[in-house]
Image (cartoon, rainbow, N blue to C red):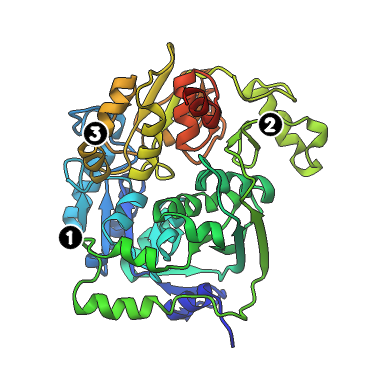
Amino acid sequence: MPRTLFDKIWEFHCVGQRADGRDLIYIDRHVLHELHAHHAFAQLRKQGRDVHRPDLTFAVQDHTVATKPGRDDDSNPSGAAFIKAMRDGCRQYGIRLFDIDDPDQGISHVVAPELGIVLPGATHAVPDSHASTVGGVGALAFGCGTSELAHILVTQVMALKRPKRMRVRLDGHLGAHVNAKDVALRLIANLGVSGARGYAVEYGGAAIAAMPIEQRMTLCNLNIEMGGRSGFVAPDDATFAWIEGRPFAPHGALWDRALGYWRTLVTDADAVFDREVTLDCAALEPQITWGTDPSQVVGISDRVPDAATVEPSRRAAAESAFAYMDLAPGTPLLGLPVGRVFIGSCTNSRLPDLQVAAAVVRGRRVADGVVAMVVPGSSTVKREAEAAGLDRVFRDAGFFWGESACSMCAGSNGDRGQPGERVVSTTNRNFENRQGLKVRTHLASPATAAASAIAGRIADVRQLLAGAA
């Protein structure tokens, strides 16, 4: 019987079924972060249990660590207790920790694929909703809660209801200055924040085949914002080339064996999905959110919608968003003044993201009155960017260049906007108060964010660069 790639990975890792109908899925490797891990460690201590496979368990300090140069445990006082608890728990249970001074420190969803911790066809769990980011390398990843995390630490399995299967086909080729962030925002706009609820989503098509691996991760990162349980891209030769040689990836004869298996990780030709969605990417322009959830999106040249044109099920949310964002229906977003720009997070903080932004910024200056920040997704990304001179490009333009951390994504390390401030951000969520009390967030790509920092207003990067030419 023809099977989807999801079926193949799920069935290979299913080791049993609970009486409540949930499957027990073996988790190959998992990554903890300091904001939630200490709760799981406390449960283990209370129950007198150990971590079953510390060799398959990794930990990072990312959510609460400061981004300022020369940081230490106390640079963000509100995060110091989390950092210490993570360090103590990892020491007690023998878990490899990428601490704040580790050369491989970084955001979990950046570090795991970057080091080869997560691999094609593998299962992966993180106590964070954006776990499926690593689906960009062909893994099946799940976010988990604290109790689930404790269960995984003790048993190496996760109890899950089997999701339905969705295929999203991305046809056509992306235009200049349009990338995976724009594709993801358009998909969420079309499907809504619950359009993929209960599904594992496989992304494919011509646009996907042409995407660098880092952009595939951006796409999978935003899968959760349309309700998807997990999201992934079938691995291909580009994936294998990207993974080869990474520290925790197989080497030598093991690499050859792994590669032979990975090449079987495709959906069979006649496999059936529960739902299929198609997006024509050829005419897509840069996208940006106008409201307070990631489905409230327009093309950069469009206007805020009129409430009457919003479908009834989304109308109340739109009315609330108009008020919070201080926007009237029909307002053009282009030219709207901004006070802050943030480039970073697990969505858009990898080296290619920074290269795109630096290409826009080079030789220009951040507009007066705008606070502009770039925070690399890992210490490795930061070193690579500095070796390429990108830090100088950003600093010369007036950007803050930070140490690796989650930073302004949720503001849990103290990096926040000011009340009433309008922010263009490369992060994944624009909820009310997400980036600070009463902060108004517009989600966009690194190119759009960089252009907006230079203009001091929401800007179309295509127009900015065409004007320079």
**Mark 3 is on which residue type?**
Gly
Q: Is residue 191 left or right of residue 374?
A: right
In which quarter of the view is residue 24 placed?
A: bottom left
The numbered mark at residue 302 is 2
Name the residue located 26 percent from the left edge and 57 percent from the top edge.
Answer: 115
Tell me which numbered mark, 3 or 2, is placed earlier along the sequence: 2
Q: Identify the residue under disc 3.
A: 389
The kind of residue tagged 1 is: Gly
Q: Hey, which residue is sitting farthest front in the picture?
A: 469
In the rendered view, would you say 255 is above or below 45? below
Amino acid type shown at disc 2? Asp
Q: Nearer the viewer, residue 14 or 401?
A: 401
Mark 3 or mark 1, which has the lower sequence index? 1
- Name the mark nearer the viewer: 2 or 1: 2
Q: Which residue is mark 1?
A: 94
Residue 373 image offset from top left, x and y in percent = 37, 27
Secondary structure of residue under mark 1: loop
Residue 396 appears in the rendering: yes
